[in-house]
Amino acid sequence: MWLGLLALHAPFLRLPYHWDEAGYYVPAALDFFRHGLLIPASTEPIGHTPLVSVYLALAWRIFGFSPLVTRAAMNLFAAATVIATLGLARRLFGKRAEAREASIAAAVLLAVAPLFFAQSEMAHLDLAVAFFTLLAVRALLDERWMFFAAAAWLATLTKETAIVLVPVAWAYLWIESRRPGGKVRASAWIALASPCLPLAAWALYYHHHTGFWTGNAGYLKYNLYSTLNPVRMQLSFLRRFYEVFISGFNWLLAALALAGWWWTRKHPQTAQMTRTQEDARTQEDDRSRRFILLTSLLVAAYLAMLSAVGGAILPRYTLPIYPPLMVLAIGWIWRLPRALARAGCLVATACLVLAWFNNPPYPFPYEDNLAFADFIRLHQQAAKYLEDYDARVPGLRVLTAWPATNELESPDLGYVTRPLRVIQVEGFGAADLQSVSPGSFDALYLYSRKWEPPGNWLERFPWLENLQSRYFDYAPQVPERELVARLHLKLAARWDRRGQWVAIYRP
């Protein structure tokens, strides 16, 4: 499985680091790799638990530091998640030929989902959390409380938000204990609560070294204090719901699953998978009921949490609920007539692969599909041009915005071989560039920091843009022609790639 995923990702495995990889995760892992620091010093600490940094540092220690090693190491998590999804589906669906086909469909559809596919090679935390969360879900279904504790410990040490598994597990166990014969031993409740221990230990350690229980002053303001607005929380919930159930052809899977549910209600006898024994049917139906309950609780908890906290509405934060949701969707789809279920899954697979390359008609994070590769390749060209220019004109002052600033300043990220002199602005909005004067820089490195396609929905519907601006800090980039006229610029170089662009201007 790992080799198969590596083959699919082969064109991207040597690419330099992208966006948050360059801004935090790779520098944080390098600090542990080089200096043994669990709390990074070369980048601003934001309180994330350190398991992925330790994991990447171990991979680099064995195989050497390079993007290829990093991406292959993260791809291993992706392969493990796909295999665990296949195992969970087989546990739920049984071992009959038709059930095996459904299990394979769940694993394949997860592997090709554009968000999962793009994140499968990126040095973020959420993919690893998805794997450990899936193990925890499986343990709860099998009533293996200590195994749940171990998986939830690992998930929490990967990213602190995974502590949401504790209230989910308690709610699940409480509901199950209310059923006839559902008495639960006290040791089970303790095991389910135990993931709070490593998080508490990390919070104490982090507070001792930084003075904060998590994050920092700016991080907490952006990700917590500024988000606790009732209107913003409702809008965030709608955005999260859209990301999970509609965007990137997810709507097609949701529609097929709803069709399977409706078919089951209308044809309760014919909608069942082929079974040979009544007791097997009873056991599988009970396991399916408990899985639906557990997945519903997990999805509700994640959507509620991510609607209340987090300044950036990044779809990758929802990755931990993708695998169980995919299994749940296939479970319903496979209740349809077999030919229809197979055709639906084939069409869905083709559409999900299409979404690797198809960008939506509104701003979205480039990391949600293969747009991230276009972004990186454009920035490689710009960085090489500026490095060559600096070799001819030493001391070149480059004005640009993050993450291009990190790309030019740190050779570790794979864009330059030596640091360049950078002047940073917050972004390319009108307010960000208002105080910039022509004599303050030697080159302006301008790029499509946001995806703003022709026919952008935010431009079509001003009320939507107003909501984005008011509650999510959206600000369109200053038009190039306006900037060129104000700063008296001339174009030195430009590159375009599938709707994204990079331009180098000189005063």
Image: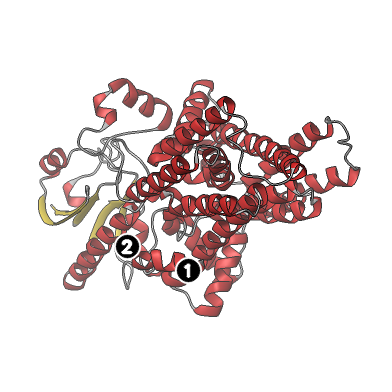
Residue 392 lies in quadrant: bottom left
Q: Position of residue 80 (x, y in %)?
A: 57, 61
Given residues 501 and 504, the one toward you in this image is 501
What separation in Å lies between label 1 and label 2 (alpha carbons)? 24 Å
Residue at image location 58% in from the left, 35% down from the top: 271
For residue 173, the mark is none
Choose between 138 and 278: the one closer to the eye: 278
Indicate left or right for 99 with 170 as reference: left
Residue 311 percent coordinates (x, y): 48, 37
Q: Which residue is more in the foreground, 108 or 224? A: 108
Is 503 displayed left or right of 376 in the figure? left
Is 324 displayed left or right of 371 in the figure? right
Question: Mark 2 Cα within 10 Å, few/some/many (few <14, many 20+)?
Answer: many
Label 2 residue SS: helix
Residue 280: percent from left, percent from top: 74, 45
Mark positioned earlier in the residue sequence (1 or 2)? 1
Q: Nearer the viewer, mark 1 or mark 2?
A: 1
**Does residue 167 sit above or below 44 in this rendering?**
above
State the image quarter where residue 294 is shown: top right
Q: At x 48% / y 62%, what residue is drawn? A: 26
Residue 226 appears in the picture as rendered: yes
Q: Residues within 10 Å of mark 1 (few under 14, many from 20)?
A: many
**Above-or-below relation of 222 to 202:** above
Say which of 393 and 65 sits in front. Answer: 65
- Residue 423 higher or lower than 260, as above or below: below
**Type of amino acid at the residue the image marks with label 2:** Leu
Residue type highlighted by circle 1: Ala
Residue 213, image x, y percentages: 66, 45
Name the element at disc 1: helix
Which scheme is used to colour this image of the protein?
Answer: secondary structure
Disc 2: which residue: 408
Query: What residue would you read off at disc 1?
Result: 72
